[in-house]
Amino acid sequence: MSLPRVGSLETFLSVPTEGERSRAGSISSTVPSIRAHRLSFNPLPESWDPVIARDVDHPAQTIGAFEVPQWKRILQIVCAVIYCFFAAGVVFGYAAIKPILKQTGAYREICEGDDICVEIRLNLMFTVAAVATNVAALPVGAILDHYGPRVCGLLGALCLVIGSLFMAFAERVAFDALLPGYLFLALGGPFTYISSFQLSNAFPQHSGFILALLTGAFDASSALFLLYRIIFQNTNGAFGLQQFFLAYLVVPVMITVMQLTILPKQSYKTVGEMIVDYEPASRDDPFGSSAIEADDQVDEETALLRETQRQEQREHQENIAHEIEELLGSETADKQAQREEETNNRSGVWGVMHNHTALQQIRSPWFVLICLFTVVQMTRINYFVATIRSQYTAILGSLEKAVEINSFFDLALPLGGIISIPCIGVILDHTSTVAVLTTLVTTATAIGILGILPFEWAAYANIVLFVLYRPFYYTAVSDYSAKVFGFQTFGTVYGTIICLAGLLNFSQSGLDYLFHETFHGDPVPVNVMLFMLTLVIGICLVSYVALQTRWLRMKREAGNAYNRGF
């Protein structure tokens, strides 16, 4: 699962250029920028896609939160949390629905009763869906910037309709409808989830909490198939796949109705956009000396009319300023910038690549190492989700114990994401990036060791670590990308990481073949291979970031000493 997980949609800090940096002595010598930098999910660089520049220069294409009644904004957030729970990440509940697919005869005729063939085909179905989720995040970002959240939401609902119909009637058609059906269910996720991020700007004082709610709903959505499996078992299979997915059509219909009636057509403005949009520029100031001098050249009636118009504009601007102040609370951009600077200084890496082009960033070791680590980890995570029952059947030598572990995993997966959300933000804000990466590599190493031990306690410990590690890992990667590469190129750089990792997830089919055919159903060799790759790449990543952080700190201290000399 790898859709973007973010804690903020904009920053009030700017990174000095090389000349400014040499004079100031450190990258931490930043000042609040005149205009806040909004996090962009668009994968195209700004020079390629003028829509980004147009949106920033003319934020009237978005809407200020104070222009919408409070009750409606609250209702919009409630609606988003509800539909994210039912749609954003349902395909990642694959481990729960896989036994039902097997029991109902999925791929049995195509594979002529060969269980290994059925296993590989079902896992391929999940692999394609996971890859599509990652790759789809790229066009979703561009569509969101071009057409707004409503179009994204409606496209997501359409994908869910198509996917549900394919899954419902898979047994009645002559072709493999399960693969495209699961694919379209996966595509519905990023369209609904990413387009809901902008709702965090509906209440800027609580934007972090709103993003946490949306992320929690995304993580919890994997429990939907678990709920269905419970119903399936309690009805002895009477409530089959067709009945479930036809009933699931209520979800895209609900999303469509919400999009057309309650949810905003345009994205909400960020704090920076509101401040810039409603702050009168000096050259357009109707109260300036040039306007007064012009009044001396017109008759008294015209001058009086202009004075009335200026008075109305002044009152209008004062009302808007008051509404924005109520919306934002007492915290100013300066205070937010100061808080951000303290957090970013703790990271030790903030701003290191901000003044570079997206191409330069992608060519750097900062990108290459985190991309390699993400590729291995994402493959490892999705492979474990797809094969958990088969792996523990072989490791523990008991199908009954494997089923119990699988059931525990189905429940722990969504709960792990929800439980870890409050802790993740605190850890990322109060620790250095080196410490975060070290924690990631250490935890991944522990998971790798526990995953090959033939003990039941090790299996449960492995699952607990896994479900807590997964959301922390994905959030840490997006946090790393924002701090190292910056908000303006976030869509390009982070999108490239996720896209490459998603495409290389097709290697899961090769891992399946090694597991079932080459190693005759023994998962340990494949797990050891993934474990060693994680360890080697992880050590390289942590070592490089630690060395660079030390060099940046020494450079900062030298600059400060130089400045004190003057």
Image (spheres, helix red, strand yellow):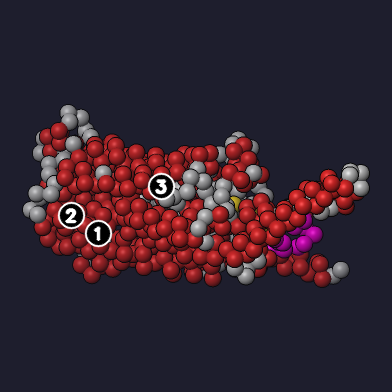
Total labels: the figure holds 3
- Mark 1 closeness class: few <14, some 14–19, many ≥20 residues within 10 Å: many
Relative to 503, is 14 above or below?
below
Decide if residue 90 is on the left or right side of residue 491.
left
Q: Quadrant of the C terminus?
A: bottom right
Front one among 497 and 104: 104
Decide if residue 489 is on the left or right side of residue 302.
left
Mark 1 vs mark 2: give the one in front.
2
Decide if residue 419 is on the left or right side of residue 484.
left
Q: Report which residue position mark 2 lands on.
A: 229
Q: Position of residue 318 (x, y in %)?
A: 69, 60
Decide if residue 339 is on the left or right side of residue 187.
right
The amino acid sitting under disc 2 is Arg
Classify mark 1: helix, strand or loop: helix
Can residue 96 be seen?
no
Q: Position of residue 412 (x, y in %)?
A: 28, 64
Give the magenta part as a residue range: 20-32
Mark sitting earlier along the chain (1/2): 2
Classify mark 2: helix, strand or loop: helix
User: CA gap, disc 1 to disc 2?
Assistant: 10 Å
Residue 410's tag is 1
Mark sitting earlier along the chain (2/3): 2
Residue 261's tag is 3
Q: Position of residue 458 (x, y in %)?
A: 26, 67
